[in-house]
Amino acid sequence: MQTHHYTATSLIPADVADAVRCALEALQTLVQTAQTHIEDQYAQAIDLGLIDEQQRLESAKPQQWLDQSKQSLQAGMMFLDRALQQPTSF
């Protein structure tokens, strides 16, 4: 996820802006932790020649699911931002 520097507007109380900022940071950390875990799984399966595990990973497609979760989390945070910023135009 790209780093988003969340700043409060006059409509958003500082504690709410801080909570959003913390959530963004936590989500970024979670996605990176999952990414590292998946990369480690692939590396171990290859390094140890675990063909069954390589095939299982290929079938499970964890990177695809992580990419989709990342996009959904980003969209969710954008929706939250719009709800808090409350723009009146498209």
Image (cartoon, helix red, strand yellow):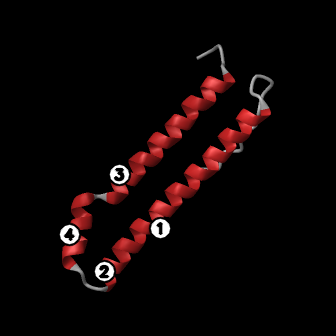
Q: Disc 1 or 2, which lies upstream in sequence? A: 1
Quadrant for residue 50, please give it: bottom left
Left or right: where 68 falls relative to 78: left
* Residue beneath the point at 34% across and 73% down: 42
Q: Which mark is residue 55?
A: 4
Q: Which residue is mark 2?
A: 46
Q: Residue at x 73, y 40 (%)?
A: 18
Residue at 24% in and 73% down: 53
Image coordinates of residue 82 in percent, x first then y, are 61, 26
Circles 3 and 4: CB atoms closer than 8 Å: no
Residue 80: x and y in percent read 58, 30
Crowd tier of the residue under label 1, counting other residues whose Cα lies within 10 Å: few below 14, some 14–19, many 20 or above: few
On the image, which quarter does residue 79 sit in? top right
The amino acid at mark 2 is Ile
The residue sitting at 67% across, 46% down in the picture is 22
Q: Mark 2 or mark 3: which comes first in sequence?
A: 2
Decide if residue 1 is in sight here: no
- Dot 3 or dot 4: first in sequence order is 4
Indicate whether 70 appears above or below 89.
below
